[in-house]
Image (cartoon, rainbow, N blue to C red):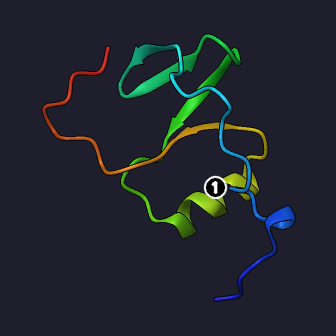
Amino acid sequence: MKIEPAKANPLARPCPFVELPLTWKGSGQAFCEHCRKDVHDLRGQSLVQVAQFMRAHKGSCIMMGPAPKADEAKG
């Protein structure tokens, strides 16, 4: 796998908002009240998958991290 310099890396700049003001729309979909954008739930995906998504969807808001638990309440 080729390593890209930070300026070309789609994950080089994390969201500046530590605590996102999310509104859950149901079915695992969320909306960021600060950015006024849909938030794509990429939890449980590999960094390669997240990078591919971000290259295809520049400027999108995402959630990253471990996969949500099956019983996790969403909105």
17, 69: nearer the viewer = 17
Q: Is residue 43 above or below residue 73?
A: below
Q: Amino acid at mark 1?
A: Phe
Q: Is residue 45 left or right of residue 73?
A: right
The image quarter containing residue 32 is: top right
Please, is residue 29 above or below residue 13 in the view? Answer: above
Task: Establish if 36 lies above or below 47.
Answer: above
- Residue neighbourhood size for the residue with mark 1, other residues' Cα within 10 Å, grouped as few (<14), some (14–19), many (≥20): some
Question: From the viewer's perspective, is 68 left or right of 10?
Answer: left
Residue where numbered disc 1 is placed: 53
- Residue shown at the point (40%, 47%) measured from the top left: 43
Task: State the residue at coordinates (16%, 39%).
Answer: 70
What residue is drawn where x is 73% and y is 56%?
12
Relative image position of residue 5 (x, y in whole percent): 81, 74
Name, please, the residue furthest toward the right. Answer: 7
Element type at mark 1: helix
